[in-house]
Image (tube, helix red, strand yellow):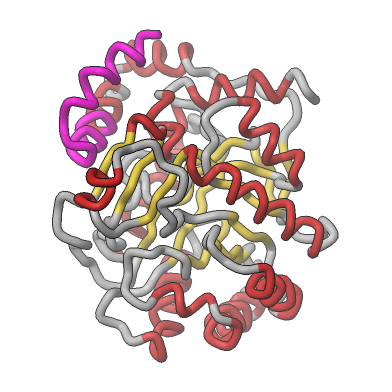
């Protein structure tokens, strides 16, 4: 209830500014021991059964999707809210500003967002530096056992033929500091990126990363994040590829370029323009992809479901469709900081 009141005020301001303000405020608040204790107590998550996936142990099945903490600024704050895992990024080899603002838009009538951020980030070296500090701080005074994923992308100026090099750079830079990797070729906001979802292009990137990975003393799980707009034929190619390069998992799904079945006035949608749509309108699309992949993969490769998760019942539906873990993003914006606790409380009753 308290967040619903705060949201009505926050939603009067530009979304990107609110995002940075609220997360910065939470991070600063945690610097005060008494505030930190209060926040951790308020949002404490007690999940009865850890989740095992691709060789890792997750304290609970609820994670935060990539794009929320692009630069690994807020890991301590997010751990205080109970997240079982967080994907940092998307990171690219070189820093880039992303697309021009405004580039994040709310559709409250649809419980949705449209974004065209464009992989804005500080670059992989800066992100790696913050992850080192996070690991060092956790080693001295552990606050959580939150799993960290690294979401990898390519710079806008990099040609698709050379994209594999960008993914390799990010993979090597982050290898010691993340628990798993997600290869992102499904954002609609980097020109030409989704073309890398085609089988041959994807095989070049994933095959190369897996070759490097298997040369490490302790290889890390590599996952692939896909769009909800793929046909069954394209999904079948993903299944073949997943088996061929021995993917550890799939994140399903990213945002959609579709604008179907929205209640927000068409004129407003047109004025917003390009970008990926997330939230409630993606829910059914995402669940359908999860279910199809689970069936085609025969449950042999774990799936992280993302898309339209606002409640415990939403998360439960994804798990019933075949997901092992879930990620929130837009639901976090609309439901507030208690979303992990609320989802886990619901799921705990179903175990």
In the image, residue 109 lies at what x, y percent?
36, 30
Whether 16 is among the magenta residues is: yes
Quarter containing the C terminus: top right
| 15 shown above or below 96 | above
In the image, residue 267 lies at what x, y percent?
23, 46
Q: Residue furthest front?
A: 266
Q: Is residue 29 visible?
A: yes
Q: Residue furthest right?
A: 298
Based on the displayed image, in which of its 4 quarters is residue 215 positioned? bottom right
Near-viewer residue (251 or 215): 251
The residue that appears at 58% across and 36% down in the rendered structure is 62
Q: Is residue 133 visible?
A: no
Left or right: 306, with 258 as reference point: right
Left or right: 6, with 185 as reference point: left
Q: Magenta region: which residues?
A: 1-23
Q: Name the magenta segment's main secondary structure.
A: helix
In the image, residue 236 lies at what x, y percent?
71, 73
| 269 shown above or below 50 | below
Left or right: 107, with 86 as reference point: left
The residue that appears at 69% across and 63% down in the rendered structure is 248
Q: Residue furthest top?
A: 1
Quarter containing the N terminus: top left
In the image, residue 339 lies at what x, y percent?
50, 25
Near-viewer residue (157 or 125): 157
| 173 shown above or below 309 | below
The residue that appears at 40% across and 34% down in the rendered structure is 110
Based on the displayed image, in which of its 4 quarters is residue 262 positioned? top left
| 8 shown above or below 191 | above
The residue that appears at 55% across and 54% down in the rendered structure is 253
Based on the displayed image, in which of its 4 quarters is residue 264 positioned? top left
């Amino acid at each position: 209830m308290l967040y619903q009141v705060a949201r009505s005020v926050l939603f009067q301001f530009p979304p990107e500014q609110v995002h940075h303000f609220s997360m910065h405020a939470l991070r600063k608040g945690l610097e005060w021991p008494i505030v930190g204790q209060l926040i951790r107590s308020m949002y404490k998550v007690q999940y009865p059964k850890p989740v095992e996936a691709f060789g890792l142990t997750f304290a609970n099945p609820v994670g935060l999707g990539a794009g929320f903490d692009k630069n690994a600024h807020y890991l301590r704050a997010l751990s205080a809210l109970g997240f079982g895992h967080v994907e940092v990024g998307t990171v690219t080899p070189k820093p880039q500003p992303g697309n021009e603002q405004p580039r994040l838009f709310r559709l409250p009538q649809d419980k949705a967002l449209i974004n065209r951020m464009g992989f804005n980030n500080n670059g992989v070296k800066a992100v790696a530096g913050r992850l080192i500090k996070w690991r060092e701080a956790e080693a001295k005074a552990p606050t959580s056992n939150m799993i960290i994923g690294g979401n990898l992308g390519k710079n806008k100026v990099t040609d698709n033929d050379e994209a594999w090099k960008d993914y390799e750079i990010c993979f090597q830079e982050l290898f010691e500091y993340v628990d798993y990797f997600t290869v992102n070729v499904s954002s609609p906001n980097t020109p030409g990126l989704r073309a890398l979802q085609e089988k041959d292009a994807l095989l070049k990137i994933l095959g190369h990363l897996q070759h490097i990975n298997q040369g490490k003393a302790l290889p890390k799980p590599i996952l692939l994040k896909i769009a909800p707009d793929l046909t069954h034929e394209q999904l079948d190619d993903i299944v073949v590829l997943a088996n061929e390069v021995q993917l550890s998992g799939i994140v399903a799904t990213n945002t959609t370029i579709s604008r179907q079945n929205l209640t927000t006035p068409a004129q407003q949608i047109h004025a917003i323009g390009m970008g990926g749509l997330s939230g409630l309108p993606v829910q059914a699309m995402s669940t359908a992809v999860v279910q199809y992949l689970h069936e085609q993969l025969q449950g042999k490769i774990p799936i992280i479901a993302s898309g339209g998760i606002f409640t415990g019942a939403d998360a439960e539906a994804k798990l019933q469709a075949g997901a092992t873990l879930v990620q929130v993003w837009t639901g976090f914006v609309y439901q507030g900081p208690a979303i992990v606790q609320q989802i886990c409380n619901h799921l705990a009753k179903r175990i």
